[in-house]
Image (cartoon, rainbow, N blue to C red):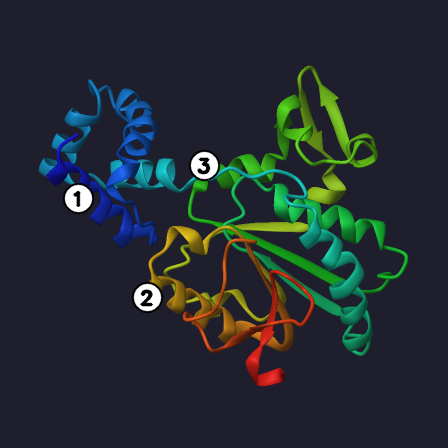
Amino acid sequence: MNVKDFEYISDILKQRSGLVLNQDKSYLLESRLNPVARRWNLSGFDELIQKLRTSSDERLLVDITEAMTTNESFFFRDQKPFDQFRDLVLPQLLEKRAATKSIRIWSAACSSGQEPYSLAMLLDEAKAKLMGWKIEIVATDLSNEILQKAKDGVYTQFEVQRGLPINFLMKHFTQDGDRWQISQDIRRMVTFKPFNLLSSPAGLGRFDVIFCRNVLIYFDQPTKSKVLSGMSGIMQDDGFLYLGGAETVLGISDDFKLIPGQRGVYGLTRNM
């Protein structure tokens, strides 16, 4: 792959998704885009670039963007954030939202659905305390293809073995050969929507909790700042923002501050 082709496709991806690729990620471009080329009956990456340069076919641009922005996900990833949600966040929300009996959660860049479904299963465990409450989990992703997989809620044996407690597997999943489908009750708790994090999130409504984990690492500083600014505008004053363990708001946003003693969980500066 020559430098000009790399820069050309990298610019497209940044404009459409915010994804920033360094030259050392050229192998990732080829490995993910060669299957796209085959689907379009093209010989490989070089012919794919040539077609893009001559036609700018929107369907091809969508396929390329989705192929590059679909990231790995698994149930109860890193575990600690979900323990914090169960032991710290949910008890506070039960107290603070006692009058409205309503909780809204946003799982941003949800990929194939494991994160929002993990939250749904935790909330199902607390359903005795949540009787009469309106609980809404909104899960978004740029890729329509991955959102369809998430809606279907069907996972391989390998996927359900990664982080999912065996008791949750037995309780909430039905096996069909080497595939497992999550129960309809849990699927109903999550609303999946296509959404580009480069867009304003105002139309999604306001949220008590936002999960945006392991997403900002793919963006440059201005894009990170823009995304966080948008999220601060739709988060309740006493809400919670989750970022990935390797992510921070330092030097990026003054809207959020780390909640003391809680790694990866942030509150709004205006409420602290």
Residue 53 appears at what percent x and percent y?
11, 38
Which residue does the numbered mark 2 point to in the structure image?
Answer: 222
Q: With respect to residue 5, does 235 lie above or below?
A: below
Please, what is the three-letter code of the amino acid marked with disc 1? Glu
Residue at the far top in the pictured view? 177
Q: Is residue 187 left or right of residue 101?
A: left
Residue 76 appears at what percent x and percent y?
68, 43
Q: Residue at x 9, y 36 (%)?
A: 54
Which residue does the numbered mark 1 point to in the structure image?
Answer: 7
Q: Quadrant of residue 38?
A: top left
Please, what is the three-letter code of the amino acid marked with disc 2? Pro
Secondary element type, mark 1: helix
Secondary element type, mark 2: helix
Please, what is the three-letter code of the amino acid marked with disc 3? Glu
Give the quarter of the figure containing the C terminus.
bottom right
Residue 68 appears at what percent x and percent y?
36, 38
Q: Residue at x 19, y 29 (%)?
A: 48
Label 3 or label 2, whichever lies nearer to me, is 2
Secondary element type, mark 3: helix
Residue 34 appears at what percent x and percent y?
29, 24
Q: How many marks?
A: 3
Give the label on residue 115, or none. none
Between the C-alphas of marks 2 and 1, the distance is 19 Å
Between the C-alphas of marks 3 and 1, the distance is 26 Å
Which residue does the numbered mark 3 point to in the structure image?
Answer: 145
Q: Give whichever of discs 3 and 1 has the lower sequence position.
A: 1
Give the quarter of the figure containing the N terminus.
top left
